[in-house]
Amino acid sequence: MLLENDAFLSELTKLFMQGKSSRSVSMTMKRYDGWTKPKPRASVVAEPAEYKCLVRATLGNKKISTVINHKDVTKFQMVSL
Amino acid sequence: MTYLTSWEEFAKAAERLYLSDPIKCRFVTKYRHCDGKLCVKVTDDKACFQYRTEHAQDVKKLEKLTGHLMRHMASKEK
């Protein structure tokens, strides 16, 4: 499920706590260009003005995700690390 | 499996792969506290590099690398 950055960080902490005893916690990071609709085959893709970062985390079958903008990267890093 | 032997190799491969195709490349980390193991993988669906460790010192290096990549991904540059 897609969350705000702060909600994502608190859910992530919970995931790590729960996964301590037995299971794997997995995290994925990828660049994201902000498209929410499918891209039509014939058209030319417009160059996005600004990229974002997509972060996902899973524990068993529980999934959470968030999108980070450039200005939120510093804040996100300080809190998460 | 494409496990690399040292962190430096992994970090270099990750940067290279990301710079070659930023929109396709993804970076995955998996942590198992019960085994004390950390696995990281970087792939662009054509090539894949992995690294596995049980050392706490590698966690620090991982944090630095993920911070660096995250910054790159959310930045304005191509």
Image (cartoon, rainbow, N blue to C red):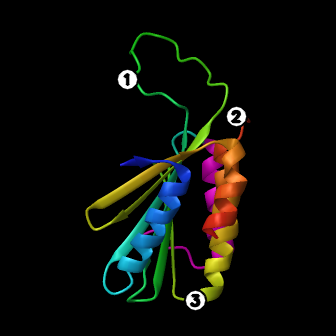
Identity, as a three-letter code, of the amino acid under mark 1? Pro
Q: Residues within 10 Å of mark 1 (few under 14, many from 20)?
A: few
Judged left or right of residue B48, residue B74 is right
Q: Which residue is mark 3?
A: B55
Q: Secondary structure at mark 2?
A: loop
Identity, as a three-letter code, of the amino acid under mark 2? Lys
Q: Would residue B42 be visible to someone looking at this image? A: no
Query: Looking at the image, which residue is at 71% across and 58% down?
Result: B68
Q: Are marks 3 and 2 in contact (CB under 8 Å)?
A: no
Circles 1 and 3 on the same chain: no
- Residue A59, compared with residue A19, is above or below; it is above
Magenta span contains residue B24: no
Q: Are marks 2 and 1 in contact (CB under 8 Å)?
A: no
Residue range corresponding to the magenta coloring: B1-21
Q: Which residue is mark 1?
A: A38
Q: Which residue is mark 2?
A: B78
Query: Looking at the image, which residue is at 64% across and 65% down?
Result: A79
Identity, as a three-letter code, of the amino acid under mark 3? His
Query: Looking at the image, which residue is at 60% across and 87% down?
Result: B56
Q: Quadrant of residue B14?
A: bottom right
Q: Main secondary structure of the magenta part?
A: helix
Circles 3 and 2 on the same chain: yes
- Residue A81, compared with residue A65, is above or below; it is below
Percent x, y of residue A9: 52, 61
Magenta span contains residue B8: yes
Q: Secondary structure at mark 1?
A: loop
Percent x, y of residue B32: 40, 81
Percent x, y of residue B74: 65, 43
Q: Secondary structure at mark 3?
A: loop
B68 vs A66, nearest the viewer:
A66
Q: Residues within 10 Å of mark 3 (few under 14, many from 20)?
A: few
